[in-house]
Amino acid sequence: MDKAGFKVFPLTPERWPDLEELFGPKGACYGCWCNHFRMPQKQRMSLLGEGARLLFAERVREGPPPGVLAYDGETCIGWLQVGPRRDIPEWNNPRRASTPLPDAPAEDARNWAASCFFVRRQWQGKGVTAALLDGAVDFARTSSARLLEAAAMDHELKRSSAGLYVGPERIFLRAGFTEVARHKEGRPLMRLML
C-alpha cells in the first residue's frame, strides 16, 4: 500500500524489528506497547515496559497482524493499531467515547476499530497519520471487515500531540468516515462502512 509517498504494511513477525526500533527501548507511550485497550488498567500497569513488549511480541508472532506500519523509504515512521473490536475489550467499555452501538456489536469479528496511532516525532504533521489510516482501511477491507470505527479527537478539543493518539477528526472525515455517536464531549465515534 503506497499512500502520500509513504508505504503502509500490516505488522507481521518479519516486521517486528521495525516496530521495536520505532517504539524505542522503553516502548511507546510510557512503555504501553499498545496494550492500553487490550486489558484492564491494573493488569496493564503491572506489565509496563518489558512485560508489555513481550506480550505484544507474542501477539504479533501468533497473528493476525494487530495493525499497520508506515515507512518512509526503509525507515519505519508510524504505527496504527487496527483490527476487530473484540481484540481490544477496554475500548468497548460502556464508559468510553468508543462504546459500541447496538448495530455494530464488539463480539462481531467483522466490526473493526482503529484505536491508537504513533508517529515518529520528526514525521509528525507530514501526512503520516492519514497514510496510516488509508492503509488501515485497505487492510480492513482485504481482511473482510464490515466496518471500521474510531473515537477521534474533534477539532474543538484542545490537546497536546500526545493526546491525539486516537487520531484527529479531520483525517477520518477526509477518509470518508461519518460521526455515528458522541458519548463524550469532543470525542465523536466515527464509522466507515466497508
Image: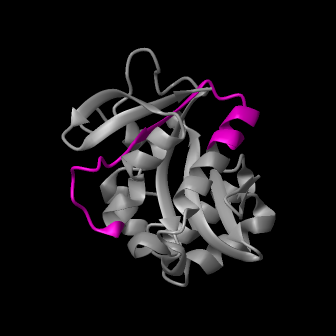
What residue appears at the point 76 percent right and 67 percent down from the top-left corner? 15
Q: Is residue 35 above or below residue 112?
A: below
- Residue furthest out toward the bottom: 25
Seen from the viewer's position, the closer of residues 46 and 61 is 61
Q: Is residue 149 magenta?
A: yes
Q: Is residue 143 left or right of residue 67?
A: right
Residue 98 in view in this figure: no
Q: How many marks?
A: 0
Residue 126 in view in this figure: yes
What residue appears at the point 51 percent right and 70 percent down from the top-left corner? 51
What residue appears at the point 39 percent right and 74 percent down from the top-left corner? 30
Q: Position of residue 95 (x, y in %)?
A: 24, 36
Q: Is residue 60 above or below residue 180?
A: below
Q: Position of residue 8 (x, y in %)?
A: 71, 58
Seen from the viewer's position, the closer of residues 28 and 56 is 28
Q: Quadrant of the C terminus?
A: top right
Q: Is residue 4 magenta?
A: no
Q: Is residue 1 left or right of residue 34?
A: right
- Residue furthest out toward the right: 14
Q: Which residues are magenta?
A: 137-161
- Residue furthest out toward the left: 185
Seen from the viewer's position, the closer of residues 75 and 42 is 75
What residue appears at the point 54 percent right and 40 percent down from the top-left corner? 175
